[in-house]
Each structure stands twice: as C-alpha cells, then as structure tokens.
Image (cartoon, grey):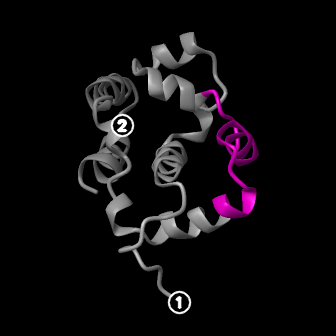
Amino acid sequence: MKEDFSKDPYKQQEYQTYALWKSLPSFLKGRPRAHLEKFGIDEEILFDLLKIKNQAQFAQEYNIDVGTLTDWNKRIADDPSLKQMNSWARKLTPNVVFSLYKNITKHGRAQEVRAWYELIEHN
C-alpha cells in the first residue's frame, strides 16, 4: 500500500527532526563535538542530533514509540519530499573536493571525486 503523503505524520515536528537525523552519516553519530567540528559541522541542531547514536536513543530522547519510528522509516523511504535530505552535506563539498583533490594528486583516484558529485551534487 502506498503512503498517503497528503496527510501529515503523527508528531510532524518530531518526524521532520527524525528524517534529518536519519539522513546524517552514521559514522558521525555519537562523536564528540571537537571531532564533528573537524568535519566542518557548525550548527547547534546538528551537534544535538549527532549526540543521538541510534534509533532507540532517538525514541527515548523525543518520547516517541519505537513502533512509530518503524512506521516513519517506511514513510521516509517513500516520501518524495525527502529525496533531497543530503542538503546538510552540500556545504561540505568544497572541503571534500579539496581533500579528494589532494588524494588524487598523490594517488590518482579520480573515481572518488566522481562518486562524491554523483552522490551529493547531482542527486
């Protein structure tokens, strides 16, 4: 059965926050602030969200039933309005491109730059 996206999900604000949290890279979740700042993260909301390591912790932090999060996961996967959830990464592109450039000039792996643009810039 297809999701009806004309109806807002239960707890709309928390749903949007959860969708953003889900879009963040898992390797950054639970990392200390200093580590996150090295990756160019400088927004308080991202620091707060990245303190949350897993779905169970998110449910506890926002007082959401885990079953609701399971439903939201399905909705997020099918929601056309969430296809651009990688927007948090766009501001990091210059840093990543420079890092990849340094790696390419040292090791000649141009496919890494192509992969970044395909995933982030041309989605």
Q: Say if the magenta span includes residue 59.
A: yes
Amino acid, disc 2: Ala
Q: Which residue is mark 2?
A: 89
Residue under label 1: 1
From the image, state whether disc 2 or disc 1 is nearer to you.
1
Position of 98 compared to 40: left or right? left
Q: Which residues are magenta?
A: 51-69
> Tag 1's secondary structure?
loop
Location of residue 123 (image quadrant): bottom left
- Residue most extreme to the top: 34
**Residue depicted at x 57% and y 70%:** 74
The CA distance from mark 2 to mark 1 is 32 Å
Quadrant hosting residue 27: top right
Can I make out residue 100 in this image?
yes
The answer to whether residue 44 is above or below residue 85 is above
- Seen at 37% across and 59% down, the residue is 82
Depth check: give the residue in front, 31 or 46. 46
Residue depicted at x 45% and y 50%: 16
Q: Position of residue 31 (x, y in %)?
A: 64, 22
Q: Which of 8 and 82 lies nearest the eye of the viewer?
A: 8
Left/right placement of residue 35 relative to residue 82 reads right
- Asked if 75 appears above or below 42 in the picture, the reply is below
Residue 92's spot in the image, x, y percent?
33, 29
- The percent coordinates of residue 88 (x first, y second) are 36, 37
